[in-house]
């Protein structure tokens, strides 16, 4: 015969849990303008990480990549500034004439940076 043990936390009905962690808000990336729906808790964590600014997942990865690729040690703030200037230059140039060619060129550029 086996005995199972249940903790008090397992017995709390779902109706009594706070919904603050599950509230979803639409937030716009301060860098590229991409909109995402995220929980308020996640938004707070990301803003703490990026000095009060909201960064989407792609831009967050790009900032990390800037830090790693740099030949000298740079701060998160400097990496963010580099990435923001890159995004603004890309956005200001307007939409690509052929999106497929643009995507291929961008992927090629990313792959060259990784090697």
Image (cartoon, helix red, strand yellow):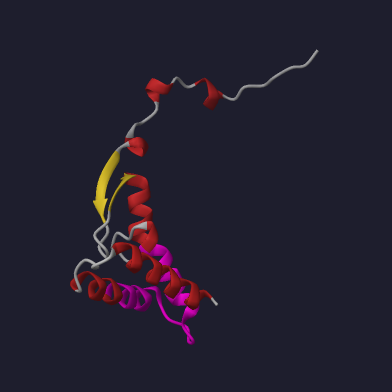
Among the 4 quarters of the image, the one containing residue 94: bottom left
Q: Residue at x 38, y 70 (%)?
A: 106
Q: Main secondary structure of the magenta part?
A: helix
The stretch in magenta equals 59-84
Which is more toward the observer, 57 or 20? 57
Q: Measured from the top left, where is residue 8 in percent x and y?
A: 55, 24
Farthest residue in the top direction? 1
Q: Quadrant of the C terminus?
A: bottom right
Where 57 falls versus 81 (above or below)? above
Among the 4 quarters of the image, the one containing residue 81: bottom left
Q: Residue at x 40, y 67 (%)?
A: 104
Residue 33 shown left or right of residue 105 in the figure: left
Q: Residue at x 25, y 46 (%)?
A: 26
Farthest residue in the bottom direction? 72
Which is more toward the observer, 8 or 33? 33
On the question of residue 49 being in view, the answer is no
């Amino acid at each position: 015969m086996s005995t199972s043990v249940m903790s008090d936390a397992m017995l709390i009905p779902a109706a009594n849990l706070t919904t603050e962690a599950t509230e979803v808000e639409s937030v716009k990336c301060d860098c590229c303008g991409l909109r995402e729906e995220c929980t308020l808790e996640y938004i707070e964590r990301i803003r703490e990480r990026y000095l009060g600014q909201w960064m989407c997942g792609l831009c967050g990865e790009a900032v990390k990549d800037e830090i790693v690729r740099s030949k000298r040690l740079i701060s998160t703030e400097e990496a963010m500034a580099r990435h923001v200037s890159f995004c603004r230059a890309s956005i200001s140039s307007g939409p690509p004439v052929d999106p497929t060619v643009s995507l291929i060129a961008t992927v090629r550029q990313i792959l060259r940076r990784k090697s």
